[in-house]
Each structure stands twice: as structure tokens, then as C-alpha cells.
Amino acid sequence: MDLNFFWFIILGVLLTGYAILDGFDLGVGIMHLFVKEDTERRLLMNSIGPLWDGNEVWLVTFGGALFAAFPHVYATAFSGFYLPFMLLLFALIFRAVSMEFRSKQEMRWWRQTWDVSFTVASTLAAFLFGVAVGNVMIGLPIGADMEFQGTILGLLGPFPLLVGVFAVATFAMHGSIYLYLKTEGDLQQRIQWWMWTTFGIFLVLYIFVTMATLVLLPSAVANFRDIPWAWVVVVLNVLAIANIPRAIYLGKPGYAFISSAATIAALTFLFGFALFPNMIVSSLDPAWNLTIYNAASSQKTLGIMRWFAIIGMPFVLTYTIAIYWIFRGKTKMDKFSY
């Protein structure tokens, strides 16, 4: 396999894994303030407590692979998104700090402060991820020197903001379904209403984002003419979305969660497929696009890295599977809880 294409696929796998796994714990954070009782908020945190840091390993691995395989993309992205990336970093840090600090003191104001911090940081992180995706799709002002030539306000166009809100809604839906699987009793019954509400919001935004993409970015479907089998993914995506309310209605939340994960995987695939072979599109001149070829490391570097990926990926997958197996089942409160 072409080494450049191989690493494009690996980055897609890592991004998909992160979006699915950290997506539901970001969703839990987004929905955190919708419960009022202290015990219930602790239950929500404990549902992701053993998992969230392992989920973010996928993001760290993605960043490391991007830096090594496509250094020009990494450098250009950071020059363009420097302030948003710093905000994202603070959001991810405050999510972790909120979880660790919240129950250290019993004062009401102390716990409420960290509860708000947890929700705001989770929502902001999801929103920033979406804004970044929207900007990459619509194109950035990249010059011939591969340098970002725009402003921070230029990143806040209608389409990127719409995709940012869509990302928040998607993760909120994904997290609500996950919480239904991890809770029981009265709390679980109230979370069932969350699933329906967040799915409805997701569906409306999905339609709007799809329409906006087709109108504003006709190039996003260009690859379908050359690779028509990719329409299968579109069909599977629609079927996965349709199966979410069906599974909820039939009382099969496990199937709903699988469908939600499949939806996120399909959306990630379509994002990469729409870009390929580009990684960052220049809005100034298509000749200045950063592709998997002109922005990549040397073939020797990519070849050596491939062996590290072949050896290392099974360890990441094994760790992920083991953690989810160990902490399967309903969330309980004990002396080690958050």
C-alpha cells in the first residue's frame, strides 16, 4: 500500500476511535448539569471516571502520528488554530481537574463551581472540535509557503459554527445513550427523555449541516464520481441514524449505542473522504492545498513509522478492550467514587 495513503487511513482510524470513545464522555459532561442531586452528579462522573483518560490516549496518538507523518499539516494547523487549540487544551485540562477536585470538599459552592466547570469545558471542547472540522472542510487561507494568512475571527464563519453546534449535539446524544446503559432506576428513566431530546436536536442539525455542505461545498461529493462504492457508507450512515430511535423505542439501548457509534464513524469517514487527497484546503488557491503527498515526511520515515504502528496499535486496542471489560455494567457508588 502507498505509504502516504496508509498514514492517511491510520489517522482516520485514530480520529474515529477518539470521536467515538471520548465523544460519549464529552457528552456526559455536556449533560452533567441536567441533574440536580449531588449523588446523581457523582454517578454521572463515575460512569466515565475509569475511562476518560484512556479515551484521550487516542487523541494524543493522533497528534503524534500527524506530527510524524505529515509535519507540514501539523505546523500549518497549529499556526492557524493556535488560540483555539490553546482553548481546547484548557478545556480538556479543566474537565480532568473538575472531576478530580469536585468531591474533595463538601461545600455546596465548591461542588457547584466544579460542576459548571465540567459542563462548560466539555461543551467548549466538543464545540471547538466541530469548528475545526468545519474550517478544514470549507478551506483556510493558506499561502504558497504553507503558512496561515487569516485571522482568528475569520475562523468563526457560519458553516464552522454550525458544525461546532452539530458536534455538541452529536456528543450529547452519544453520551445520553451511554448514560442510559450505565444507570438504573429513576435516573435512568429521566435519561430516556434526554436520549429522545438530544436525538431530535441531532437529527435537525444533521439535515442542516448536510444541506449546507452540499450547497456551500459541492467539491465534497467530487470523490463519489471516482469511487462510487463510497455511497454505501452514506446509506449505512442513514440506516444507523434511523436505527437509533428504533432501538430506543424497542428498549434496546445497546443497539442504540452501537448505531450512534456507527453514525460517528460514518461521519468521520465522509469527512476524510470529502477531503482526500487533501488534508488542508487552501481557500486562496487550490494549488496551495496541503495533500497527503506534498505535506508528508520522507518515504523512509513513513516506512519506519509503519512498523511502529503495526506493533503499537494492538497494545492500544488491547488496553481499550480490557478497560471497558473490567468496568462493564452499571455504575455504583463506593468509597473510591468521585
Image (cartoon, rainbow, N blue to C red):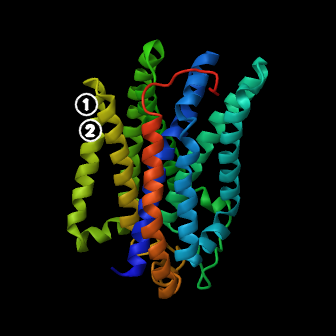
Q: Residue at x 70, y 42 (%)?
A: 94
Please rate how many residues cluster around mark 1, counting C-alpha atoms within 10 Å: few if below 14, some from 14 to 19, many from 20. some
| 180 vs 160, nearest the viewer | 180
**Label for residue 246?**
1
Can residue 35 be seen here? The reply is yes
Q: Quadrant of residue 86?
A: bottom right
Q: Amino acid at mark 2?
A: Ala
**Residue 166 x/y as whole percent:** 47, 45
Q: Quadrant of residue 40?
A: top right
**Label for residue 242?**
2
Location of the C terminus by quadrant is top right
Can residue 286 be seen here? The reply is no
**Residue 47 x/y as whole percent:** 52, 30
| 60 vs 306, nearest the viewer | 306
At mark 2, the secondary structure is helix
In this rendering, is residue 257 above or below 167? above
Q: Residue at x 55, y 27 (%)?
A: 44
Q: Residue at x 73, y 24 (%)?
A: 111
Q: Residue at x 48, y 42 (%)?
A: 323
**Label for residue 9?**
none
At mark 1, the secondary structure is helix
**Residue 307 x/y as whole percent:** 45, 75
In this rendering, is residue 254 above or below 234? above
Is 154 on the left-hand or right-hand side of 69?
right
Q: Is mark 2 in CB contact (under 8 Å) with mark 1?
A: yes
Is 89 on the left-hand or right-hand side of 295?
right
| 27 vs 107, nearest the viewer | 107
Q: Amino acid at mark 1?
A: Arg
**Residue 236 x/y as whole percent:** 24, 50
Cα distance, mark 2 to mark 1?
7 Å
